[in-house]
């Protein structure tokens, strides 16, 4: 087979991979459940390419992510549930439905009004879906609270951010970031209290509360906590790499150095980095 820019070619390749007898043994044994982790991984790799500003890599990673959509759609088609065309039709209809200010009569809306309109449309869609399920005899015993619909598979910090955003929409929120910052300090104190008591389970619980409060504080400053932590990880890796390079210049290594020496070099790396950034 030859490559092509045509989406139909990609669909044909996936069909060939999933054809019993002549397809790929690995692809044939996959299920929605086994492919799901790869779908999440590819989404993270897209985000990583964006953060690094690598557009060539972003092109490749978007292709990998598209493959995941095609893979899931093919497995659904084999079950007679839906196909790739249904996926495209569903998202196209949703985009038109949720943008009446572009494709309908609602015009000249502020960004705030667009957000409110989007939320209202989503509520209507959810109600219509529940009504259709009831008409078809499906169980309607689904959560219907303000926090409904937040996927458990989300990264924990992202899920914390989403949960607090949903709670804030119904008025459960501090009006001032300073109050959230105070909550962060309170949770840190509770971590130390739990540590003093020697209970590992209590420490774990309090650290969870601390991280949740930190994610909530990020939201109050309109900061994505997952992005902030990823950047902090990159910064730590970069600075520690500088420390190791400094040690190597001295004929030493991190494993053979004292904490005091590494902290001193860390300080030097930090100051040098800030000098470059300010200069």
Image (cartoon, helix red, strand yellow):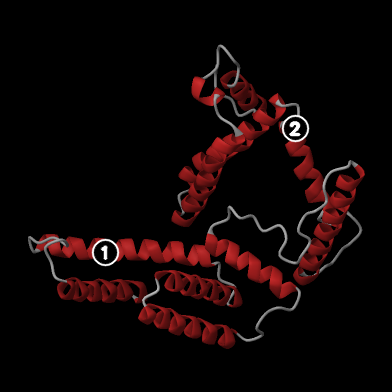
Of the image marks 1 and 2, the number of the one nearer the N terminus:
2
Q: Residue at x 36, y 81 (%)?
A: 196
Instruction: Give the quarter of the image for residue 65.
Output: top right
Q: Which residue is mark 2?
A: 85
Disc 1 and disc 2 in contact, CB within 8 angstroms: no
Image quadrant occupied by the N terminus: top right
Count residues near mark 2 (Cα–Cα under 10 Å), then give few for <14, some for 14-19, many for 20+: few
Q: Position of residue 211 (x, y in %)?
A: 49, 71
Q: Position of residue 242 (x, y in %)?
A: 23, 64
Q: Is residue 276 above or below residue 26?
A: below
Q: Is residue 62 above or below residue 76?
A: below
Q: Which residue is mark 1?
A: 240
Q: Is residue 126 above or below residue 81?
A: below
Residue 94 visible (yes or no): yes
Q: Is residue 256 left or right of residue 114?
A: left
Cα–Cα span, label 1 and label 2: 49 Å
Q: Is residue 93 above or below residue 272?
A: above
Q: How many marks?
A: 2
Helix, strand or loop at label 1? It is helix
Q: Is residue 124 left or right of residue 208?
A: right
Q: Position of residue 229 (x, y in %)?
A: 45, 65
């Amino acid at each position: 087979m030859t490559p092509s820019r045509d989406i139909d070619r990609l669909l044909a390749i996936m069909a060939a991979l999933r054809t019993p007898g002549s397809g790929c043994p690995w692809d044939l044994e996959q299920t929605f459940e086994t492919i799901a982790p790869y779908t999440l991984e590819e989404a993270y790799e897209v985000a990583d390419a964006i953060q690094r500003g690598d557009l060539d890599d972003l092109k490749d990673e978007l292709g990998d992510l598209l493959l995941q959509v095609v893979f899931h759609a093919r497995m659904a088609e084999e079950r007679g549930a839906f196909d790739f065309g249904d996926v495209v039709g569903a998202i196209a209809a949703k985009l038109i439905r949720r943008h009446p200010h572009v494709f309908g009569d609602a015009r000249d809306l502020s960004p705030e009004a667009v957000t409110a309109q989007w939320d209202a449309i989503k509520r209507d869609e959810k109600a219509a879906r529940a009504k259709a399920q009831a008409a078809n005899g499906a169980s309607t015993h689904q959560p219907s609270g303000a926090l409904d619909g937040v996927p458990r598979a989300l990264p924990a910090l992202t899920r914390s951010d989403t949960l607090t955003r949903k709670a804030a929409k119904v008025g459960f929120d501090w009006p001032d970031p300073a109050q959230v910052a105070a909550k962060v300090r309170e949770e840190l104190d509770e971590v130390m209290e739990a540590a003093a008591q020697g209970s590992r389970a209590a420490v774990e619980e309090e650290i969870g509360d601390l991280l949740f409060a930190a994610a909530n504080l990020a939201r109050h400053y309109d900061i994505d906590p997952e992005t902030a932590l990823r950047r902090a990880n990159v910064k730590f890796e970069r600075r520690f790499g500088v420390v190791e390079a400094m040690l190597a210049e001295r004929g030493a290594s991190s494993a053979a150095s004292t904490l005091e020496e590494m902290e001193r070099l860390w300080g030097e790396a930090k100051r040098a980095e800030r000098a470059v950034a300010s200069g």
